[in-house]
Image (cartoon, rainbow, N blue to C red):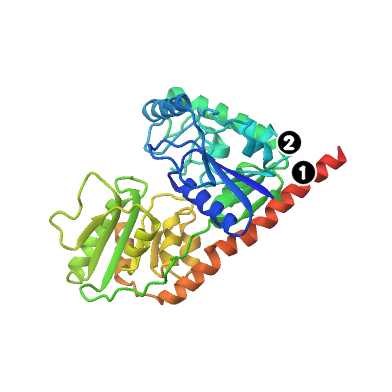
Amino acid sequence: MNIVHLITSSRGGAATAASRLNEALVQAGVDSSILTIERRNSPHERDDVIELKSTRGKLLSSGVTLFQAKLVQKSTSLVTPISLDLLDWEDFKIQNADVIHLHAFYNLVSIEKFLNKYPDKAKIVTLHDERFYSGGCHYAEECHQLESGCQNCPQVNKPFRSLVAIQRKKIITEIRNAPNLIVICPSDWILKRAKSALPDHPPTQFFKIFNPIPKPEVQKSPIQNSSYKVRIAFISQDLENPVKNLKLLLGAFTSANKQINFGFSLTLIGNSKFNYATGNPHVSQSSVQSLSALQDLLSEIDLLVVPSTHDNLPSVLGEALMCGVSVLGSDVGGIPEIVNLFNQDTFENGREESLLKALLRFKPGNRIELQNQACAIFGYETIVSKLIPVYKMAIRKIESTKNQA
């Protein structure tokens, strides 16, 4: 069985999830690799990650992205109705694949080609967000325009709203005519929304499979907590991303320290032009360049807070739990599913008072139990054992269709 994963770039949540899944499959002995457009100067050194060598394509991709960010989208939520097709469909990796697994398509493949090219190959898509079937819109503001149209969309500037609606209609038609497409959903939340958005797609073609999370190479004992009662962490690639809502946490953190005489510390992990630690001895800030560095930082943390205003399934939840760190999340998207699965706590989205109460009632959990449970749910072996049967089923269905023909 030969699997090829498609991602636009090696950065971002979808790319991270795809890379980890590929790694899990390779470790299990599966012939698996990644095709990607890479914008960084330094090339990949891994044999299973193949970059598309197209300087012109990369420049076009950057131009289209900038155009849509400046003119199409009205809010900070990414909207991408215009998408290039930069994949070399004659690449030997594609031609030799039994399964083409799409994770992030924007400016990499056209959905039409993905669905219709190579009818003899199984097609899998993992929904890391909703753009695959929405016409390029994340529906991040819960506007529910899937049902009522896009003409009043709060995320898109008015001249481009029809473009999103037209693109969505085209995509839905293409998916409707692709009965062999398998849809992988990493959360019950997006599974429900995908089925609602694609009512004509066979229900048996949807599967919920979590994204895999690597466990620490060495199980580290938590560093002794002597200075503070509770050590909190907040993680985001961009600390200023309004979706991640650091502002809410900072407010609740300040109020909690006033009530419990500085009983909390806060570690911010991510990139920022602003230093939040300046003048605040109870706040530290750093960025990490590797998973092992992140795991080192998490070994010093008691609680990860995820105050996102909307999210499918943040990978930081699994990363923290795999290190035995308790989690606290807002009650939106796929966050409550994971938080509740581990008997952790949630708070009301956007309500500082609700977050403050959750911080004040927090009690550290058993780190070893959390690690063991996380490994059983998100571990590489667990996810591969769920996904390989789906791959095999998709291949058998294609072979059955060919035999009937």
Q: Is residue 335 above or below residue 125?
A: below
Residue 187 spot, x, y in % from top left = 54, 55
Secondary structure under the numbered disc 2 in the rendered image: loop
Quarter of the figure with residue 319: bottom left
Task: Name the outermost residue toward the right.
Answer: 404
Above or below, comparing residue 88 to residue 340 in the picture: above
Element marked by disc 1: helix
**Which residue lies at the image location 42% right of the left edge and 30% below the top edge?**
65
Label located before the other in sequence (1 or 2): 2
Q: Is residue 308 left or right of residue 187?
A: left
Task: Give the number of marks.
Answer: 2
Distance, label 1 to label 2, CA atoms, is: 8 Å
Label 1 Cα neighbours within 10 Å, binned few <14 / some 14-19 / many ≥20 = some
Q: Are marks 1 and 2 in contact (CB under 8 Å)?
A: yes
Residue 200 image-quadrant placement: top right
Q: Point out residue 211 in the picture as x, y percentages from the top left corner.
A: 53, 56
Name the foreground residue: 189 vs 126: 126
Q: Amino acid at mark 2?
A: Pro
Can residue 72 be spotted in the picture? no
Q: Looking at the image, which is closer to me, 52 or 221?
A: 52
Residue named by callout 2: 119
Instruction: Please name the residue that numbered disc 1 is placed on.
Output: 398
Residue type at the position of mark 1: Ile
